[in-house]
Image (cartoon, rainbow, N blue to C red):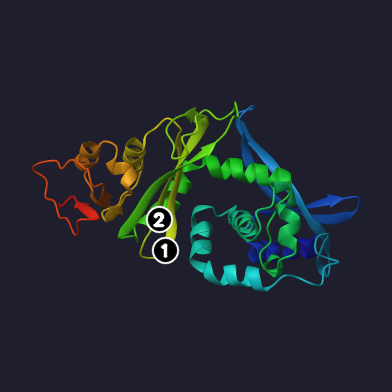
Amino acid sequence: MEDWVKKIVDEERKKRNVPLEAKLLNGNYYLYHSTSRYDRTSKKAVKVSEYIGRITRAGISEKENDARSIYEYGNSALVYSLSGDMIARLKRYFPDRWPDLYALSMVRLIEPVPLKSVKDRWEKLSISREIVAHLSPNTLTDILRDAGSDMGAQMDLFQSLITESKKLAFDLSSIFSRSENLNIAAKGHNADHIYLPQINMALAFDLDKYRPVFLKPIEGSVRDVKSLRKVLEEIHFDGILVLDTGFSSQDLAEIMRMEMRFIMPLRRNQEIIYGIKIRLDSVDSGVYYNAP
């Protein structure tokens, strides 16, 4: 590799903060984003490259965005100004994939387009000139598979958010699916009383900082109480959990045996478990507090 090419590649690595390499093809140098993914068939790491642009002595001549001169500014600028903390966490826990994960999240927040349209939608945003993301459909498939299977990085990210929380609201939602490739899709109870295979999504929400801090798919047949137990086994949280009446209608005694502090509204006909400290703030809306 010629010295001037090496210098440009080094500068682009620092600026883009992603793994890059130069390839010599037909006498010209081209810049590629290079990474690797685990191939479950061959059971080994496979190199993945995505073309960025041609390397010239003047810099990188990218094929994308060359003809565009007008961008959407307000929406992406607002989201970007509010997401500095989350970008820092993504850089820490997903250092090789953070630009792609952030760009995908921003696009789906602004407009929930299908994966095949994410790249085009991202290139219309002004922030795409500052953050270089690789969002082709094939690349997104690899990103979602790799990030989704990296449970260690996910849990570290969630735990970094939970550690700063004092009050968490916990709830369970259901997503219905007839896919034969989802092992956790199973028939179970849901608020809509629909008897179809479903996936339960456990969500914890920080009530002080007003942001989601935990998300986990759980087998569709798992009840709310058991899902809560599964989550508590994975996270370290010493604050107060806020639960809805759906939990009190199930096995309240099982919830009270868990080592946690919680608040939940009680039904008018709720049976009171003797030997536990009770505080009823009003007749209409009882509040159960499991004191330490």
Amino acid type of the residue tagged 2 in the rendering:
Phe
Residue 60: % across, % down: 80, 64
276 on left or right of 98: left
Query: Relative to the observer, which residue lies in front, 22 or 244?
Result: 244
188 on left or right of 4: left
Amino acid type of the residue tagged 1 in the rendering:
Tyr
Residue 194: % across, % down: 50, 33
Q: What element carries label 1?
A: loop
253 on left or right of 68: left
Residue 165: % across, % down: 34, 60
86 on left or right of 130: left
> In the rendered image of this protein, does residue 118 appear above or below residue 46?
below
Q: Can residue 1 be seen in this view?
A: no
> In the rendered image of this protein, does residue 33 appear above or below residue 48?
below
Query: Relative to the observer, which residue lies in front, 24 or 35?
Result: 35
For the residues labelled 1 and 2, the Cα–Cα distance comes to: 7 Å
N-terminal-most mark, 1 or 2: 2
Query: Relative to the observer, which residue lies in front, 29 or 96?
Result: 96
Q: Can residue 101 be seen in this view?
A: yes
Which residue is denoted by mark 1 in the rendering?
210
- Mark 2 and mark 1 in contact (Cβ < 8 Å)? yes
Q: Residue 159 carries which label?
A: none
**Quarter holding residue 77:** bottom right
